[in-house]
Amino acid sequence: MGSVDLAAIKAAHTRIKPFIHRTPVMTSLTIDAMTGAQVFFKCENLQKAGAFKYRGATNAVQSLSETEAKRGVVTHSSGNHAGALSLAARVRGIPAYIVMPSSTPQIKQDAVRGYGGQITICEPTLAARESTAAAVQSRTGAVMIHPFDNDAVIAGQGTAAVELLEEVPELDAILAPVGGGGLLSGTAIAARALRPGMKVVGCEPQLADDAAESFRTGKIAPARPPRSVGDGLLTSLCERTFGYIRANVNQIALASDEEMLAAMRLVLQRMKILIEPSCGVALAVLLNGATAFQGKKVGVIISGGNVEISRLV
Amino acid sequence: MGSVDLAAIKAAHTRIKPFIHRTPVMTSLTIDAMTGAQVFFKCENLQKAGAFKYRGATNAVQSLSETEAKRGVVTHSSGNHAGALSLAARVRGIPAYIVMPSSTPQIKQDAVRGYGGQITICEPTLAARESTAAAVQSRTGAVMIHPFDNDAVIAGQGTAAVELLEEVPELDAILAPVGGGGLLSGTAIAARALRPGMKVVGCEPQLADDAAESFRTGKIAPARPPRSVGDGLLTSLCERTFGYIRANVNQIALASDEEMLAAMRLVLQRMKILIEPSCGVALAVLLNGATAFQGKKVGVIISGGNVEISRLV
């Protein structure tokens, strides 16, 4: 299926460096004491557009030829990929057509509009999303940039792990959330190549444990009903990401919604940064005992910070 | 009165560098568009113990002789200085005695205890704070480290501005909140020496506008009744800080409590970092027209992030 390797991720890094933030790596003595590990947080919530998604979107957009680029890009997304692709397109000066389900929160629609994305609203089903995006694509000639079933996107997402390992080369493990698997794929490919012996762990809500089942059975499990607060992690894997994950990931660990929300509040209170429930999951599995990294150096990809403030308390 | 100059601030920087975070400088296209300026935020909310106070406390603690240090340090504080001094003392392996008024929120008491500080509770009046601290001092022989009426503390606070100007040397203006005036003094001394032509602005809540009055009349005005949400900015100046401020500051600008809270929420939503209402004041004066920096490069010291999450919404 896919062909992303460390060379592709490093090429992506060179390509996107002028456009992205090199996000800080943060630590917390309190969280180290609570987890028994030494935890290094790669803060992609401080990335442009508020999430790691800007890395993959920028790599995809900047990889287009002039001819491809001038017709613009199209995607369907209710989440961070929509905002990230809109901003990446604006930076290149090309249109972004975003198909969003009618259930998309106003704040995410506003973010896309703020970055210059052109929104088409559709029914909140995968079939409607795909057919609407296909119609927009055939009308405009825009290039489809899938949020994770795309090697340029996956290579871009892997650059966060490359930066983290540049700053903390002696990591024993790296944790990243898993939804569609783009971030986890890029992270795992980079980590496995740069430090073959390290543990790579995907982190998933118990209420959306399809990746854990897929990993266990060897067959892609369907998405669960959308009940978890980890709204960025509800999608199922695709063949491409599943292939990368099977080849490079050691474990998929689970956490409950309550544990994810507690982790989000802990990070806000102690580290003073805002993270989404979807990325509280990685810290939650360090705290709930689903992993065993006592005394180890553990990297955590903090994937995004796009959350409505009213949900914090 | 005081004798802090750029050399003292640079010496403090060398002394504290091994112990502090070099905090990131962040920017936001949204906030640039809203203010009409190019704003560079020095994120001391991401400093250890959650505030710039750790710089001054560390410089004071690390400046003590071995003989002085072994008896420990003492202060009275209901806020960030208490936590910062406790942690700075623990790092040096010496006791910290903290006198806190009985009105101190539980969360701030917990922070001090978490850093190993030994708390004595007193009545919530300045007289009780001072007499209790004096009693603790005479019992223990500890060295009094005042939160701002102390040159070692002021020199430490100035190191944030030094780092900001290292990263963005061409700043036209720098803004910092003013309470007792330690941060503003250190910031102003550093900025005036490193870039003589730049504007230095102190930012204060309208409901605690004693520094603005002092600056206007040339005479230290008393603290206002504690009504502002900017709970770190309620103290009045002392002769030492007033002297530094008169010599180096161009303007004291005011913002309302509503404007400060709106700035705090804006930073959380757009920049994904948690700031105290007390440091929302600097962004608030950029937004409310109390300053005029259209098209200019403006540095803002984000002073701290210690706020109870329940107050966010």
Image: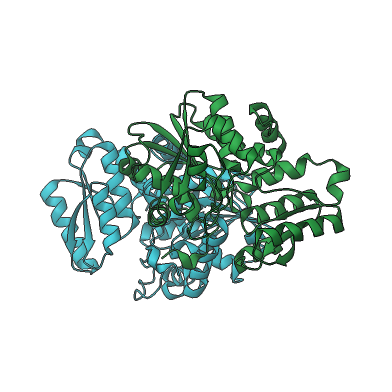
Chain colours: A cyan, B green
Residue B85 is situated, as x and y percent measured from the top left of the image, at 70, 52
Residue plotted at (67% across, 35% down) = B13
Residue A177 is situated, as x and y percent measured from the top left of the image, at 47, 61
Residue A2 is situated, as x and y percent measured from the top left of the image, at 38, 51
Q: Which residue is most to the left?
A: A139
Instruction: State whether residue B177 appears in this view.
Output: no
B152 or B38, which lies in front? B152
The number of numbered badges drawn on the structure is 0
Quarter of the image where the C terminus of chain B is located? bottom left
Relative placement, left or right, of A64 versus B298 is left
Residue plotted at (43% across, 51% down) = B206
A167 or B30, which lies in front? B30
Q: Is residue A235 above or below residue B14?
A: below
Instruction: State whether residue B280 appears in this view.
Output: yes
A291 or A87, which lies in front? A87
Q: Which residue is most to the right?
A: B67
Quarter of the image where the N terminus of chain B is located? top right
Q: Is residue A256 above or below residue A73?
A: below
Residue A26 is situated, as x and y percent measured from the top left of the image, at 57, 50
Relative placement, left or right, of A157 versus B119 is left
